[in-house]
Image: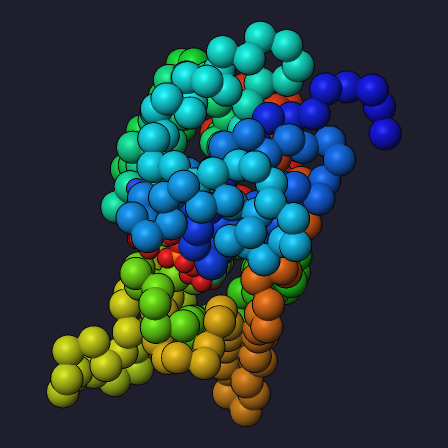
C-alpha cells in the first residue's frame, strides 16, 4: 500500500440492490474514500448509507438526491486523485448522470444497463473531448467475462447460437446489457448465424425472442427467485454446446467494481467492457 491519498468515491443508486453492495465494498477498501451516496428514492433520504447497506457502524455518509452539488463538492477537492462516481441507478437516468459527472471532471464507472448504442457513442465523444476516463461495464463478474471468451471461441466453429438471459422480475430493461454485449462480441466475427432452413411464422409475437446483430436471438426470462443468469447455446447436427453463468450473490460483482474504480483514473476516454481492463 502506498501513501497516496485515497480515491474519493460517490455511489449513485446507493439505496438500491447493487448500490448497497458497492457502499459496503468501497467503505472496506483502504485506498478508497466514500464521500457521497446519492439516491432518488424518497424513503431513504437522510439515512446513513452504511447502515442501509447492513454495516454495523454508521459511515456518516447520508443518502441525498442532490447529484450536482455532490459532484461540485468532490470536484472542488483540490488535493489527491480526481473523484469517481459509480452508477447503479436506472436506464432512464444513467445517460444524464454520466454527462453531468464528466462535465465536473468526475470519472464515471457505469454498471447501469439500458444505454442505447447512440447514447454510448455520445458519451464516448463527450469523454474524449474532456479527456476524461469513463468505464461502461455491462457485467462486473469475472465468470461472465470467461463465459463470453468461451462463447467467442465456440462461435468460430458453430453457425447456430441463441442466448437466454434470466433475471429477477424487478429488472427494468430487456434484453439484459450482458446479453446484448455477448451478442455484439459474437457478431464481431463477421459471420451470419442461424440461417433459416424453413420459413418461420411467429404465432404469438416475440415467440422467437429479439433479433440482435448477425441473426443472433436473445430470449429474456423474468421471475422472482432469480438473480442474474445467462446461457449461450450453440447447436450443430448431433450436438449441443451450452455455456451457463449463474450469480447467487451480488457480491460477485464487487472485485470488478473496485478494479474499475482504480482503473478509470488511468484512462482519458470511454472504455466499454470489463475484459478491456483486466
Ligand atoms: N454491470 C453489472 O455488473 C450489473 C448491472 N446492474 C444494473 O444496475 C442497475 C441497477 O440495478 P439494481 O441495483 O438491481 O436496481 P435497484 O432498483 O435495486 O437500485 C437502483 C437504485 O437507484 C435509484 N434511482 C433510480 N433513479 C435514480 C436517479 N435518477 N438518481 C439516483 N438514484 C436513482 C432507485 O431508487 P427507486 O427505487 O426509488 O427508483 C434505487 O434505489 C440496473 O440497470 C441493472 O441492470 C445490476 C447488477 C450488475
Ligand atoms: O439487473 C440486473 O440484475 C443485472 N443487470 C446487468 C445486465 O443487464 O446485464 C448485469 C447482470 O446481468 C445483472
Q: Is residue 205 left or right of residue 25?
A: left
**Colour scheme of the picture:** rainbow
Residue 239 image point, x, y percent = 56, 87
At a point 44% along the width and 51% down the height, the residue shown is 15
Residue 59 image point, x, y percent = 60, 40
Q: Is residue 207 left or right of residue 12?
A: left
Q: In which quarter of the view is residue 152 placed?
A: bottom right
Q: Is residue 13 above or below residue 32?
A: below
Which residue is the extreme one toward the top?
A: 78
Q: Quadrant of the C terminus?
A: top right
Q: Is residue 101 above or below residue 129?
A: below
Count the marks.
0
Q: In which quarter of the view is residue 95 placed?
A: top left
Which residue is the extreme one toward the bottom?
A: 238
Residue 112 image point, x, y percent = 41, 48
Q: Is residue 67 above or below residue 180?
A: above
The residue closer to the viewer here, 88 or 148, is 88
Please state the quadrant of the image where ligand 2 appears.
bottom left
Q: Quadrant of the N terminus?
A: top right
At a point 72% along the width and 19% down the height, the residue shown is 5
Residue 208 image point, x, y percent = 27, 78
Res. 214 in view: no
Q: Is residue 214 above or below residue 46?
A: below
At a point 54% along the width and 19% down the height, the residue shown is 268
Q: Is residue 4 left or right of residue 190?
A: right
At a point 40% along the width and 41% down the height, the residue shown is 46
Res. 268 in view: yes
The residue closer to the viewer here, 141 or 196, is 141
Amino acid at each position: 500500500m502506498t501513501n497516496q491519498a485515497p480515491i474519493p468515491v460517490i455511489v449513485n443508486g446507493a439505496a438500491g440492490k447493487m448500490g448497497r453492495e458497492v457502499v459496503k465494498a468501497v467503505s472496506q477498501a483502504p485506498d478508497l474514500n466514500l464521500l457521497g451516496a446519492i439516491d432518488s428514492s424518497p424513503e431513504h433520504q437522510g439515512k446513513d448509507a452504511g447502515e442501509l447497506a447492513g454495516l454495523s457502524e454508521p459511515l456518516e455518509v447520508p443518502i441525498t438526491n442532490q447529484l450536482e452539488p455532490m459532484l461540485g463538492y468532490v470536484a472542488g477537492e483540490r488535493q489527491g486523485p480526481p473523484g469517481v462516481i459509480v452508477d447503479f441507478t436506472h436506464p432512464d437516468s444513467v445517460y444524464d448522470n454520466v454527462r453531468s459527472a464528466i462535465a465536473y471532471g468526475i470519472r464515471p464507472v457505469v454498471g447501469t444497463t439500458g444505454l442505447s448504442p447512440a447514447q454510448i457513442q455520445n458519451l464516448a465523444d463527450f469523454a474524449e473531448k474532456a479527456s476524461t476516463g469513463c468505464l461502461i461495464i455491462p457485467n462486473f463478474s469475472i465468470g461472465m467475462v470467461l463465459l463470453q471468451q468461451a462463447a467467442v471461441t465456440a462461435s468460430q466453429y458453430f453457425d447456430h447460437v441463441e442466448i437466454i438471459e434470466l433475471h429477477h422480475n424487478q429488472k427494468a430493461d430487456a434484453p439484459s446489457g450482458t446479453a446484448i454485449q455477448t451478442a455484439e462480441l459474437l457478431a464481431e466475427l463477421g459471420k451470419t448465424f442461424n440461417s433459416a432452413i424453413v420459413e418461420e411464422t411467429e404465432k404469438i409475437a416475440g415467440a422467437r425472442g429479439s433479433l440482435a446483430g448477425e441473426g443472433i436471438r436473445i430470449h429474456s426470462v423474468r421471475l422472482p427467485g432469480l438473480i442474474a443468469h445467462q446461457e449461450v447455446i450453440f447447436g450443430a447436427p448431433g450436438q449441443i454446446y451450452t455455456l451457463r453463468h449463474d450469480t447467487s450473490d451480488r457480491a460477485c460483482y464487487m472485485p470488478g467494481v473496485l478494479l474499475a474504480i482504480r482503473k478509470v483514473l488511468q484512462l482519458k476516454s470511454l472504455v466499454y467492457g470489463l475484459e478491456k481492463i483486466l
